[in-house]
Image (cartoon, helix red, strand yellow):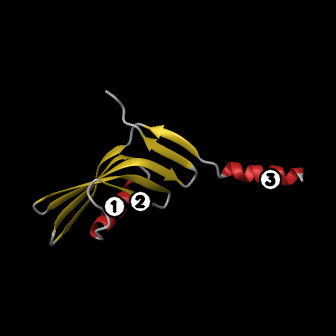
Amino acid sequence: MLFFLFLSGTSYAQHSTSISNYRYGYNGMELIASSKKGTVIVSTFNAKKQIKEEIAQKVYSLFVENKIRNNASITIEGKEAHVTGKCKIQKKGTLTTVNFYYEKIFWFSGLTEIYRRTLG
């Protein structure tokens, strides 16, 4: 009986979650796509380096499929984490910019990271 309690407690500890704040992420253009309709530039802000390209690719796919709206919060499902953030879309002529601002990252390891702006 004691062994069973120890085993179940150890198993639970491996799946627990923790929450952490981060203040610095990567900002920049991740993807530029041209078509007959125009050019789309996808940029990410407050991004984590190891997932920024994959998330930008998924943001673009959702944009092409008309599944995101301006100023809408969305969750992008990646291979290493799910990312929640806000999308801002601007159009000028044939140029469209899609800016995705990371707010929360839910890593599959159990860690949740929340972006907090630095003051100053």
Three-letter amino acid code of the residue under disc 3: Leu
Secondary element under disc 2, as helix, strand or loop, is strand
Distance CA(mark 1)–CA(mark 2): 7 Å
* 24 over 120 or under it: above or below: below
Give x and y (percent) for residue 68: 31, 62
Seen in the picture, residue 94 relative to 8 is either above or below; the reply is below
Residue drawn at (58%, 50%), measured in percent from left and top? Answer: 110
Give the crowd class for mark 2: few <14, some 14-19, many >=20 residues within 10 Å: some
Which quadrant is home to the C terminus? Answer: top left
Give the image location of residue 47, x and y in percent.
Answer: 38, 48
Q: Residue tagged by mark 3?
A: 7
Distance in Å between CA atoms under marks 3 and 1: 41 Å
Which of the 4 image quarters holds residue 37? bottom left
Q: Which mark is residue 76?
A: 2
Secondary structure category for the residue under label 1? helix
Among the two numbered marks 1 and 2 on one chain, the one whose residue lies closer to the N terminus: 1
Q: Nearer the viewer, residue 58 or 4?
A: 4
**Viewed as shown, does residue 2 lie left or right of 62?**
right
Work out how far the residue at label 2 is from the one at label 3, CA to CA, in angstroms: 34 Å
Q: Residues within 10 Å of mark 1 (few under 14, many from 20)?
A: many
Q: Earlier in the sequence, mark 2 or mark 3?
A: 3
Q: Amino acid at mark 2?
A: Ile
Query: Residue at label 1?
Result: 59
- Residue pictured at 47% horizontal, 56% vertical: 82
In what element is the residue under mark 3?
helix
Q: Residue at x 64, y 49 (%)?
A: 16
Q: Amino acid at mark 1?
A: Val
Residue 107 in the image, given as x and y percentages of width and height: 52, 52
| Circles 1 and 2 in contact, beta carbons < 8 Å | yes
